[in-house]
Amino acid sequence: MKNRCKWINLFYILLLIFTMDNFSIADSLDSNILQKANISSKHQDMMKEYLNKSAMVYLKSLEENPNRFPEKENIELYKNEKRELYWSLLGGKPDVTPLNPVVVRKGTKSTYRYEVLYFESQPNFYVSAVLFLPLSEPPYPCLMVPCGHSQEAKGYSEYQKLCILLSKNGIASLIYDPPGQGERITFLKADGSPDVWGTAEHTILGLGCILLGENYARYEIWDGIRAIDYLETRVEIQKDKIACSGNSGGGTQTAYLMALEPRIYAAAPSCYLTSWERL
């Protein structure tokens, strides 16, 4: 029995030595293949470059298609078809549910007045906003201002300066927080400060949306559409003169909204879209 144990121990010792030798040999092997290939960029960019090249080929084919735009009499049909397509890609249009708006506080300054409020774009999905109003007699045209990627969102000083300037010139404005910014940050530390926010939160939530067959953009777009619904409840606002303009991430939202919402009278995305090729 003792001899048998000795042989077993010797076997494991030899096996360990043999395995270690093999590891050292494997470590010395040059197993890199792609580094020796004629690839112009880093390996981690291969998928992006492949998709970009495929997209460029498709865009070029569109440009060369003489029938890419409909005839004048078919414009409305074309727009409706595209809107239905976009909504299907986003996961479908949500149901229109009660807004349940609440004005938290209001005030008057020397050149404008304001109302701090929130509404529900979807049940229990709260959108925090500020409505800026001129001191002149209503009704007013109104600019809807989706926010770019500042943590303060509607509280960002430059965005508020815009809204105040509009009020001084007789134009109302509604500025609202997107999810992940301002008062709508989801991931908080124990002390209540943001853990992640902005594009980081959008990415995390976006992954969950994909698993549900949806798209994160659907929520931000619907916030904007329901913001218009809210503005239409206000007697101070000219319902046929509601415009939209946002910067950066707000420019992205503006581009979506101007395509999907026919009630928008005019729109101006800022610091966002130049051309499909550039995008």
Image (cartoon, rainbow, N blue to C red):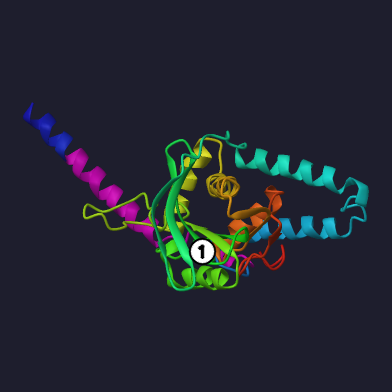
Can residue 29 be seen here? yes
Looking at the picture, tell me which residue is in the foreground, 11 or 275.
275
Q: With 155 as the anchor, is 76 left or right in this view?
A: right
In the rendered image, which quarter is residue 40 located in? bottom right
Looking at the picture, tell me which residue is in the foreground, 140 or 25.
140
Q: Does residue 11 belong to the magenta stretch?
A: yes
Can residue 127 be seen here? no
Q: Residue at x 22, y 52 (%)?
A: 190
The N terminus - image quarter: top left
110 is higher (above) or lower (below) than 102:
below
Magenta segment main secondary structure: helix
SS type, badge 1:
loop
Q: With 10 as the anchor, is 194 left or right in this view?
A: right
271 is higher (above) or lower (below) than 141:
below
The C terminus - image quarter: bottom right
Image location of residue 18, percent across then percent down:
29, 48
Looking at the picture, tell me which residue is in the foreground, 200 or 25.
200
Q: Does residue 71 belong to the magenta stretch?
A: no
Q: Amino acid at mark 1?
A: Gly
Image location of residue 42, percent across then percent down:
55, 67
Q: Residue at x 24, y 46 (%)?
A: 16
Q: Write the start and end of the magenta stretch as one range.
A: 10-38
In the rendered image, which quarter is residue 274 located in? bottom right
Task: Tell me the residue that label 1 is attached to.
Answer: 148
Q: Residue at x 43, y 60 (%)?
A: 29
Q: With 27 as the anchor, is 12 left or right in this view?
A: left
Image location of residue 255, percent across then percent down:
65, 58
* Mark 1 surroundings: few (<14), some (14-19) or many (≥20) residues within 10 A: many
113 is higher (above) or lower (below) than 213:
below
Residue found farthest to the top: 1
